[in-house]
Amino acid sequence: MNKQNIIKPRKLSGFMELDPKDQLVFDNMIDKVKQIYLRHGFLPLDTPVLELSEILLAKSGGEIDKEVYRFNKGDTDICMRYDLTVPLARFVAMHSETLHYPFKRYQVGKVYRGERAQKGRFREFVQCDADIIGNGELSLVADAECLKMVDEVFEALNLQIINQISNRNILFGYIEGLGYGKCTKQILTILDKINKIGKDNAREELAKLDVKEKDIESLLQIIDKKGNFDEILSEIEDISQNSTFLNGIKELKEVYAYLKAMQIDENKIELNLSIIRGQDYYTGTVFEAVIPNHREFGTVCGGGRYDNLASYFSEKKFPGVGLSIGFTRLFDLLLQNNMLEDIPATNIALQIIPLGNTLLECLTLQEYFSKQIICDVAYEERSFKAKMKDAGKQEIPFVLIVGENEVVSKQYSLKNMATSEQFSLSKEECLQKIIATLNTK
Amino acid sequence: MNKQNIIKPRKLSGFMELDPKDQLVFDNMIDKVKQIYLRHGFLPLDTPVLELSEILLAKSGGEIDKEVYRFNKGDTDICMRYDLTVPLARFVAMHSETLHYPFKRYQVGKVYRGERAQKGRFREFVQCDADIIGNGELSLVADAECLKMVDEVFEALNLQIINQISNRNILFGYIEGLGYGKCTKQILTILDKINKIGKDNAREELAKLDVKEKDIESLLQIIDKKGNFDEILSEIEDISQNSTFLNGIKELKEVYAYLKAMQIDENKIELNLSIIRGQDYYTGTVFEAVIPNHREFGTVCGGGRYDNLASYFSEKKFPGVGLSIGFTRLFDLLLQNNMLEDIPATNIALQIIPLGNTLLECLTLQEYFSKQIICDVAYEERSFKAKMKDAGKQEIPFVLIVGENEVVSKQYSLKNMATSEQFSLSKEECLQKIIATLNTK
């Protein structure tokens, strides 16, 4: 290839691409999430990355359009999916007659948003979603099951979280009860961004909506309520007689009773009335999990209850509840903050190094070892010394040196690279020692 | 939602979307493939689905362009990847200084080809690739390792294969030795499609290239050679003195010696001189695995040795060898031909059914069982009878009936749905019995 024809290798900005060792950790964490979903009886769904624009943008009303990767192929107007919820809605509507309800599916997949690239924002990212969909109706046990899974997922990932839980009907009904039912949406929008804009700006904006001063203070007070379920519930359950409010209280109490029956760790949940979640479509339970020692990470998992999943694709009603983890962003935060505990220097347990003319015997030994451990043969033409040095640099825990004498005696030199101990052992003894040593780590 | 606004739910044609139960089998098979790759010391790589068109189409020379999904986002000319090899080349060229060689990476991911949809062809499909990349040079042990992995992968998937192996230099050198070095490419192209066009048409096309009749017959004879390595090698090793030919023989012998040392199952490999593989870039070992009882499936796994992976992105030389499984196509063939052995009706081991006011106790029991088995609670408001019927329809092996008496006595009614046996047991005994029964299946 002519030097002038060399194309500078580069990737698109805003796309994560991990070092393979980090990718191994990423994949292992994803497997742990999937295991929790599976154990709760969820099944995997894998929808295409590409969908008809008409389908994918059915509900968007224009907000998402700018961000979406959209193009024509021949006469077909196509989008890359920007979430996993619209494809789920399309799937449920298409197969509503044959699904078993409650339909519990998880989907781990990449989604695409061509927004302006900035630190911590990715244009391609993996979401780990799990949703429970009912046919016509759905028990509140489903809400509790999703909340329980949030707890279990982060336990499996060894990350301390607090899951902040509310029910939108409480705030919704409270606002209605104060007499501002006509501008509930605008008020919720202001309250939802209070952490960004501050209380004074919120007061100002609320006043512009003609909310009375004392009502403003009541609203600011109620969204400050957070903590233990029993305490907060008893504090607030009498502050409004609005039926939506009372329904929200009732639903939240019921979900909490299920959570206790499920033996959820109470240190990991709190009732938090400031949790609103932007999206319009939540209609009951809402939650956002944060890492208390790293509040700056923001929401690491969120979700809630929606009345109707597939309203754009079906006349039937499919209520649902779900959770979503923006996994790429979470992983990036953990990586940047050195919070990934177990990135191994290598996953190879044993490096076999031929000394003299023993390559074929080394390959036969590899075949033996690799049934139980990850084992590699240093088959490149380099000096023995260079290969030993390289095994050390890679932090491979064990090296097996196979010289011509060892081939005859069938006693091989096994070196523990951490301790520099060296043993002369049969292959069976070598395997035993390696496994025993690695298991005690 | 107004009936008129309902959008008919549908997906793009040519995109696979499995029933979640089939998807579970798909995912389990993919996990098995990954396990084999990992055990051989390969690490995962996950490159973005989107790349700059300039990068992705660098090597194509126009052939692939029609099929590629290509579009502009702002000023950026973007493509969806159509294979995993070009992204690997880009990655290696970008990180060549920091990689450890031989660099062993696998990538399991979706690729996109917008070709005309037809039966068994997909526009989005999962490839399972594994490649070994050297820095400057790469031992032929790497070729043998890839071939060994093909064997192990299909063993793990419980599919009988024959891996048909050759070395392109043999045929290449033979043609050169006959004196047709100037039109080697054209001749290989004809020989490569001989199964499609038949021998008579091949004779005609070769004659048009001025290949003499006796040479045509020699060519047709040599590509008919297939079978045991030792036999075929001894038959052909003296038929040409061309140096490329002799080099091909030598390489193939060496790879075969490594395969024997690796204790490959000799029933699963054959030397087959008709294996050419279309792509220009293979330069040595080539192979195509087929399922002997289903030759009509075509190649289920293929690959080979290439001299230089990243020639478009770097002046350095990175020889490599790899294998690729078109997994979506393979899975579809297995599904259509009822060759997937273990699609479970459900993966749920135990359905807990509340009888009377025992839902909370059922949730606590679920928490207990789901640490070890997949366990679901029938929490929807339906009659007990309907729930029992539903568990039967779903083919859930065990049902735990939790009535108010059971809650008091802590002895629960466990029903084996296959045998209709019913037991009254503690929760520990229930768990034991379920695990024991499922393990004997």
Image (spheres, coloured by chain):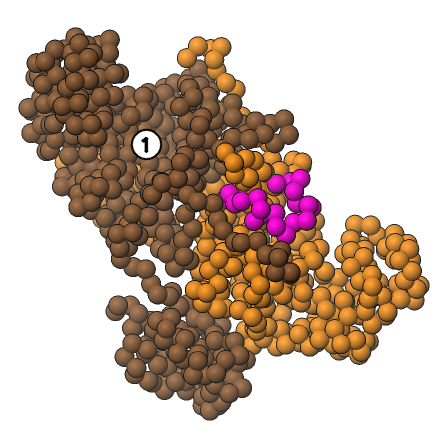
Chain colours: A orange, B brown
Q: Residue, x 47% and y 74% (percent of image)? A: B377
Q: Residue, x 53% and y 79% (percent of image)? A: B381
**Depth check, front residue: A92 or B131:** A92
Q: Is residue B219 left or right of residue A391?
A: left
Q: Residue, x 54% and y 68% (percent of image)? A: A134
Quadrant for the N terminus of chain A, please: top left
Where residue B210 appears, as percent x and y from the top left, is 17, 9
Q: Residue furthest front?
A: B4
Residue A59 drawn in magenta: yes
Where residue B182 appears, as percent x and y from the top left, is 24, 8
Badge 1 density bin: few <14, some 14–19, many ≥20, Cα 10 Å: many
Query: Which residues fall within the magenta stretch?
Result: A49-68
Q: Is residue A197 above or below residue B216?
A: below
**Chain hosting mark 1:** B
Amino acid marked by disc 1: Gly
Q: Is residue B209 above or below residue B310?
A: above
Q: Residue, x 67% and y 73% (percent of image)? A: A252
Q: Is residue A250 left or right of residue B28?
A: right
SS at circle 1? strand
The residue to which callout 1 is attached is B322
Residue A271 drawn in magenta: no
Can residue A203 be seen here? The reply is no
